[in-house]
Amino acid sequence: MPGRRLGRRALGRDVHDVAPALLGATLTHAGVTVRLTEVEAYSGAVDPGSHAYRGRTPRTAPMFGAGGLLYVYFTYGMHWCVNVVTGREGTAQAVLLRAGEVVAGHDTAAVRRPGVRPRDWCRGPARLATTLGVDGALSGLDTTAPGSPVVLRAPAEPVDPARWRSGPRVGVAGEGGDADRYPWRWWLDGEPTVSPYRPAKPRAPRPGA
């Protein structure tokens, strides 16, 4: 039995409440469903790691929308990454979907990720977006709208918060070398799909929202 579809009320809360609550949730698009095992929170104007830290731009405009929109961006000149916008309109909060497990659409996922072990299909944000067939054309899409091609559902079974783990975000520049101040990455303990932690390199582009 699939979990309930997540609407504006569930996603319109503060990003630090929504992010860990998305662990175990599922995202479905283009024939593949992924159960989320790792996420990161980005908190707009108060977060130097956020794309929205310096204000609104044409690229980041979806982040300033209402909870439930998608913010999809291109990174390192080759990869798409997908975020779910949270909070009230104008707050520019978003959750980067870092990793997950394919739970439906395995044949389609295998075509999109040829020669890759299933454990690694969505082990990292760019891999997750590729497996789901997500690209920049979906940035700004409202996942809460009727007929949305992207559907986000709560976990079918409640996830025990004792399984939640948190720590510094992966590879985020702009935090002044003090990543421990931002333990805004959450993951499910014991999940093989969770991506490895790597600190930021000097002058590296920000991989998060």
Image (tube, rainbow, N blue to C red):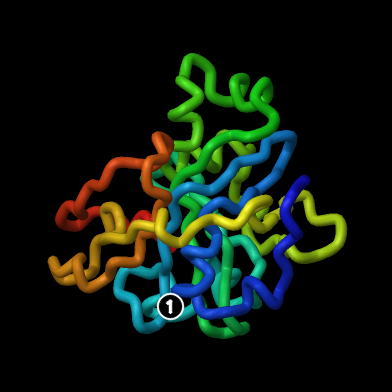
Total numbered labels placed on residues in the image = 1
Drawn side of residue 179 relative to residue 97, left or right: left
The reply to whether residue 120 is in sight is yes
Q: Which class describes the residues within 10 Å of circle 1: few (<14), some (14-19), or many (20+)? A: many
Q: Residue at coordinates 45% horizontally, 61% vertically from top-left?
A: 161
Drawn side of residue 31 relative to residue 91, left or right: right
Q: Which of the 4 image quarters holds residue 3?
A: bottom right
**Place of residue 201 in the rendered image (x, y in percent of width and height, measured from the top left):** 17, 52
Q: Which structural element holds mark 1?
A: helix
Q: Quadrant of the C terminus?
A: bottom left
**136 is higher (above) or lower (below) than 54:** above
Drawn side of residue 151 relative to residue 41, left or right: right
**177 is higher (above) or lower (below) than 34:** below
Residue farthest right in this picture: 147
**Place of residue 47 in the rendered image (x, y in percent of width and height, measured from the top left):** 34, 76
**207 is higher (above) or lower (below) than 194:** below
Q: Of residues 54 and 179, which is closer to you in this image?
A: 179
**Place of residue 131 in the rendered image (x, y in percent of width and height, measured from the top left):** 57, 34
Q: Quadrant of the N terminus?
A: top right
Q: Which residue is mark 1?
A: 44
